[in-house]
Image (cartoon, rainbow, N blue to C red):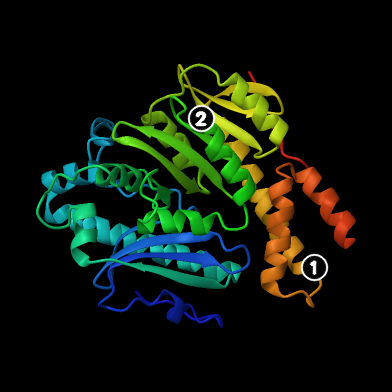
Amino acid sequence: MVYKDKGKNYGAVFSVDRNFSGLVVYRRKVLEDPVLSAYYVRGKPVYADSFLIKEMWWEGLLSKEEVDNNLFGDVFGYAAKKYGKRYVEHLVRKSEDLINRTVQIIQDFGWEVDAEPYPSTPEEVERMFHLGVYRREKSPEDIRINLNALGFPIFYVPGYEESKNARVFFSTLEGTKRPVRWIMEKVGELEGSVMFVLPLFILGYLNLNKGRAWIVTKDIRKGVLALKYASPLKGTPGELLKEVEKARCCRYVVWNAGDGKIALYDKGRINLMAADEVIGVVEDYLRSYNRLLTDVFNRISSHTPPRMRKMLIHQIAERNPYIGDFVREVSSRFGINFDHGEIKPKKQS
C-alpha cells in the first residue's frame, strides 16, 4: 500500500513491519477515538474495520441468505470452507481497499493519527479468520469470531480481562469511565441485547448464542445489524430506562423491539422506528457532537497542553450527553459561544 504524505507523516504511521502479526488500532490524536482497526499477518492486512466506511467484509463474496444462515455459526469459517483461496484473496483485497480509503479520508481532513499495536502470533490471527486449514474454534473464540464478523474488533468478553481485545476495549473507554462503568454495572445479566449512545461512541451489550459481550463502536449501522442477529431484548426494561434517564449516562438507548421495528429511548419516551430512521437520528447526533468536540478543542487556549484539553473536554462530555447542556457548560467555563442545536428524532410513531 502506498500513502501520499501531506505533511503529517502518514506513510510512517500506517507502515507495518513485514514481520508484524496482530491487531493495530489507529486513533485520532484530537479525540483519541479509534478511527481504524486492522488485523495483520506478517505485515499484510487480512481484516479491517472503520466507522468511516459503511461496508461489511463479506460484500461481493457472500449473498444475504448465506450471511443470514451462518453469521452466528461462524461466517468466516463458512466462507473459507466454500470459497477457499478466493475467500482469502477477497478478505485481503477488501482490507487493503478499506485501509486505503480510510487513510484518504484521514488525509483529506488533516487528522493526526497514532498507531497502537497489539502483537500476536501469525497462527492466532490465521485461526481467527480461517486463513489456513478450516478449523472450528471453541468459546470464547466463537464469540470473537461472531463479533469480528459483525465488524466489532473492539470488544470485551466478561471473564477475559487479560485478552488483547479487552485491553483495547478498556483503553478506548479512557476518559469516559464513569458513565460506562455505571451502565455495565446496571445491565448485568440483562436478557437480550441493547445499545447505549454516548457522546463519543456507542456502547453495546450483545447476547450471542455463544455468550455475552460488550462492544464499542461509532457505527450505528453495524450496531443495528447486530441487534437484528443477536438475541432481542425481552420486554421493555422500564426500571433500567428510568435509572438511565436519572443518571444521564447516555443520550439514547436502542434495542430490537421486534416486528421490524427498532426502539429508541429518548427523554423518557420510547419511539418505535424503522432501522434507517434510528440510524439517521444516531448518526446526526454523533456527527454533530464530534464536530462540536473538535471545535471546542481548537478554541480552548493554546496555553493548555493538548492532553489536558482532551481530558477537560471528555469530562464535560461525560456529564452532558445532551448537546445543549454541553454547549452551556463550555460557554460558561471558557467563555466560548457556539451555534449548535440539539438533535431530535426525525420521525416518531
Tell me which amino acid carries mark 2.
Answer: Ala
292 on left or right of 166: right
Q: x, y percentage for residue 263? A: 56, 24
Q: Quadrant of the N terminus?
A: bottom left
Which residue is found at the position 41% from the left and 53% from the top? 166
Q: Nearer the viewer, residue 315 or 109?
A: 315
- The residue identified by callout 2 is 275
Q: x, y percentage for residue 151? A: 38, 47
Name which of mark 2 and mark 1 comes first in the sequence: 2
Q: Estimate the spatial distance between the alpha carbons at disc 2 and disc 1, rounded to whole Å.
A: 38 Å
Q: Nearer the viewer, residue 5 or 225?
A: 225
Q: Nearer the viewer, mark 2 or mark 1?
A: 1
- Name the element at disc 1: loop
- Name the element at disc 2: helix
- The residue identified by callout 1 is 300
Q: Nearer the viewer, residue 291 or 121?
A: 121
169 on left or right of 239: left
Which residue is found at the position 23% from the left and 35% from the top? 70
Q: Quadrant of the C terminus?
A: top right
Tell me which amino acid carries mark 1.
Answer: Ile
